[in-house]
Image: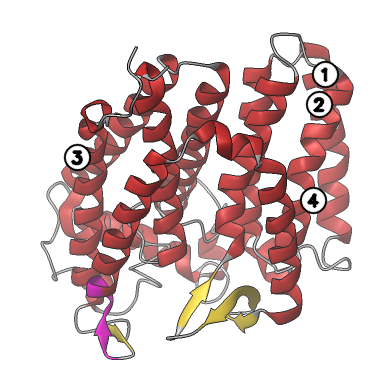
């Protein structure tokens, strides 16, 4: 065992995959916004701003890899309190855009989205709760309830913004923590029954309680039959499926997507970037991109297996849960297998909050990886 950290233990292969996907994201942001109304904001091309975010993310990743993750776990409760305060501040002071109050405006025309960072806080909080507080004992139903409440409080605050997509990303975190914590089958059955009772109630009374909006209900309904309302609620999904279909086997080429360049595909650089990629690079390009994501997830799981302690493994698998959920929902959304929820594609979709969160989370993964050999 060594006394000091060494970047020799940094997972450079994982970083290579991450940078490759990020580079493809920059290419697609450039291509999908070329000649469209999305091309620039405040005079700077979006793909250039994305490069800045990637560089900033790399700095965060390397800094996070140097901070002892055990220290982060020890202070997870303070991070949790700060995140709740930030979510409350959004509801009071947040800037309203696109029908939601999700961002706090910062100097320099920048925006901070606390709900993105709450995912990382939940990873740390749940990892601490199950790995440090419970050791190796089987969690009781009281433990399950406490873990559920830790995720439920921020989830409800994010639903109030409203941001159904981000709120849903907290669910796989809780399930991953419960699974790794050794939840009993009967406790899992109770959760399923309670969820089965609450979901219909949320569907009926959610709009009255301002937890979900009517347009969100329409999205959930129309993804099954988008052609029934192709000019309104089903428009986004219909255009996305058309774009994917136009891609064929090898795609129409960079800057040649008829749906993308014709401004038919909504938000081609954010929520529907996978549809734009599939139109321009076809089935081969889409499968290749998904393969890269698969390699990233497998690499993360390998790192979790070799973590020096239970807490480190919990942290890495929490990151796996978030990334897998994002990839599954976003890719499923653009081909009509999932409802439109506004969940970005990791490392590909344009946006600083999501990108920086991903790099920071991967930096903590690197932290766990590098400390395997430090006594």
- Name the residue carrying label 3: 16
Which label was assigned to residue 187?
A: 1
- Name the residue carrying label 4: 153
Alpha-carbon distance for marks 2 and 3? 38 Å
- Name the residue carrying label 2: 144
Alpha-carbon distance for marks 1 and 2? 8 Å
Q: Which residues are magenta?
A: 43-48
Task: Characterize the local packing of mark 2: few (<14), some (14-19) or many (20 or more) Cα atoms within 10 angstroms.
Answer: many
Residue 300 x %, y %: 38, 28
The quadrant the C terminus occupies is: top left
Would you say residue 334 sits in the magenta stretch?
no
* Label whose residue precedes the other's in the sequence (4 or 3): 3
Alpha-carbon distance for marks 4 and 3? 36 Å
* Label whose residue precedes the other's in the sequence (1 or 2): 2
Whether residue 20 can be seen here: yes
Is 271 on the left-hand or right-hand side of 342?
Answer: left
Q: Nearer the viewer, mark 1 or mark 3?
A: 3
Q: Residue drawn at (27%, 44%), measured in percent from left and top?
A: 18
- Colouring mode (rainbow / by chain / secondary structure / one colour): secondary structure
């Amino acid at each position: 065992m060594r006394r000091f950290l060494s970047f020799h233990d940094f997972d450079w292969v994982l970083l290579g995959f991450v940078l490759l996907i990020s580079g493809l994201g920059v290419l697609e942001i450039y291509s999908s916004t070329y000649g469209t109304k999305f091309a620039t904001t405040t005079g700077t091309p979006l793909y250039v701003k994305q490069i800045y975010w990637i560089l900033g993310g790399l700095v965060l990743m390397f800094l996070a890899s140097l901070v002892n993750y055990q220290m982060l776990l020890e202070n997870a409760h303070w991070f949790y309190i700060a995140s709740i305060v930030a979510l409350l501040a959004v509801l009071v002071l947040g800037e309203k855009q696109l029908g939601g109050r999700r961002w706090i405006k910062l100097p320099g025309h920048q925006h901070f989205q606390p709900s993105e960072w709450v995912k990382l806080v939940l990873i740390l909080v749940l990892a601490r709760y199950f790995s440090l507080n419970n050791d190796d004992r089987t969690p009781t139903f009281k433990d399950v309830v406490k873990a559920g409440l830790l995720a439920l409080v921020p989830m409800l605050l994010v639903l109030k913004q409203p941001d159904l997509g981000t709120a849903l990303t907290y669910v796989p975190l809780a399930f991953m923590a419960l699974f790794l914590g050794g939840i009993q089958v009967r406790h899992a059955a109770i959760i399923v029954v309670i969820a089965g009772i609450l979901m219909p109630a949320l569907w009926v009374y959610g709009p009255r309680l301002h937890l979900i909006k009517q347009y969100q209900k329409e999205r959930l309904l129309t993804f099954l039959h988008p052609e029934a309302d192709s000019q309104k609620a089903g428009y986004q999904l219909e255009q996305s499926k058309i774009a994917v279909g136009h891609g064929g086997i090898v795609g129409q080429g960079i800057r040649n997507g008829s749906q993308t360049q014709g401004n038919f595909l909504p938000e081609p650089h954010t929520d529907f970037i996978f549809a734009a990629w599939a139109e321009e690079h076809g089935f081969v390009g889409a499968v290749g991109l998904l393969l890269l994501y698969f390699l990233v997830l497998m690499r993360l799981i390998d790192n979790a297996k070799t973590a020096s302690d239970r807490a480190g493994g919990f942290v890495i698998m929490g990151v796996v849960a978030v990334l897998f959920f994002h990839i599954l929902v976003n890719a499923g959304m653009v081909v009509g297998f999932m409802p439109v929820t506004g969940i970005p594609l990791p490392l590909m979709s344009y946006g600083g909050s999501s990108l920086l969160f991903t790099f920071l989370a991967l930096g903590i993964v690197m932290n766990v990886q590098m400390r395997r050999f430090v006594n």
